[in-house]
Amino acid sequence: MAEDRHTTVGPRGLVIIPAYNEARSLPDVLREVRAAAPGFDLLVVNDGSADETPEVVRSEGCAVLDLCFNLGIGGAVQAGFKYAVEGGYDVAVQVDGDGQHPADQIGALSRPILEEGCDMAVGSRYLAPERYEGGRLRRLGNAVLSRMCSLLSGQRVTDCTSGFRAYSARALAYLAHRYPADYPEPESIVLLARQGMRIREVPVKMRERRYGRSSITGVRPLYYMTKVGLALALDVIKEAPRGREGGKA
Amino acid sequence: MRPISAFVVFVAVVIALVVVFYIRRWRLREEYSLLWLFLSAALIILTIDQGVMEWAADRLHVAYSPAVLFFLALAFVAVMLFHYSLEISRLSDQNKMLAQEMSLLRAKLETSGPRAASPGRVGPSKVDLAVADDDAL
């Protein structure tokens, strides 16, 4: 099973699935990912769930990182990055545990990493021919932040809040070391760009989540936008940690 | 001694007693205990010897000498709060790293355990882990 893949030559891929109380949707998500990306190892990061998330994952025979308390999406995903770095993976794809991210796009998302030398590929809802509908405030917030990300990273970004992403080994090594704690998606684009890394967006079509609700509803998008906007602005004055390329804002 | 002076001295003594109480219970680190004891001593000295404040206000060209005291008190509180913000940031960072490290180690234990032959089928339960620990000892 998982061990066999390690012996085959060629790039090694890992799918990282952060999950917080996703026991209901995880079995489907895991099955879909397995079917769509059979060459990838699977890792679920259980972010201190109160439900049967860890039991469900183990009964599916999937590797799991059990965080002893809830760290939030940033800390959970970063734990996955650390696992990927220790395992020496060439590419890691982050897929949400709620079933919003289309598993059949994992291959498309990892292609820029494996074939074009990109360091991060972001699945964008706004590049796809069928436009993603969300609340108006959400779309506005995303547009403003994406604009900021484009400016600060010097690369074209249309969907900076998307959590459906693929990372190269180099990006993983950096993010395992430094990853924002909450709302990490937009910030990590700028952080990686400042390290001289290449970021590519790939059009994807996302689905409505089946269970649970988004944490960003009502007027929350405005709060999110303000908070992340300020964090992005602050990133500019942060010392670039001794990366090989050095940092340039 | 004016009533207000007596009251301030009383408060300062209470602060000192509370600090001593928590030191005895091993619940306050030395650096903090010294700081709070120093504050209590400063309160007593400034209350008993009003001349110190007058002298300081005079040197700083402040007409109303208590203003100097207010400023110092506010500055003290602000510095303490900033110090706590730094501490909290550091502690939550370390806390996060510990949780991540622990989950990674646990995952390693699970795959290298006796059940590694059937990868991930059923991970060792918490009870199994405890038993493994006993064996190691």
Image (cartoon, coloured by chain):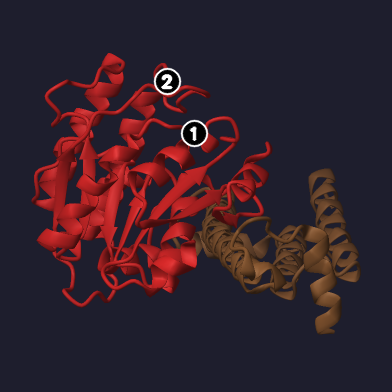
Chain colours: A red, B brown
Q: Residue B81 sits in which quadrant?
A: bottom right
Q: Mark 2 points at which residue?
A: A217
Q: Distance between the residues labelled 1 and 2?
A: 25 Å
Q: Residue B131 sits in which quadrant?
A: bottom right
Residue at image position (16%, 44%) is A201
Q: Name the residue under label 1.
A: A28
Residue A154 position, x and y percent, is 8, 51
Residue A114 position, x and y percent, is 19, 61
**From this viewpoint, is residue A181 visible?**
no
Tags 1 and 2 both on a single chain: yes
Secondary structure beneath disc 2?
loop
**Amino acid under label 1?**
Asp
Category of crowding for the residue at label 2, using alpha-carbon neighbours closer than 10 angstroms: few (below 14), some (14–19), many (at least 20): few
Q: In this view, does A62 lie above or below A103?
A: below
Residue at image position (34%, 71%) is A8
Residue at image position (29%, 73%) is A9
- Pick the residue in front: B76 or A55: A55
Residue at image position (57%, 49%) is B70
- Pick the residue in front: B85 or B102: B102
- Pick the residue in front: A101 or A71: A101
Q: In this view, does B6 lie to the left or right of B78?
A: right
**Amino acid under label 2?**
Thr
Name of the residue lying farthest toward the bottom = B137
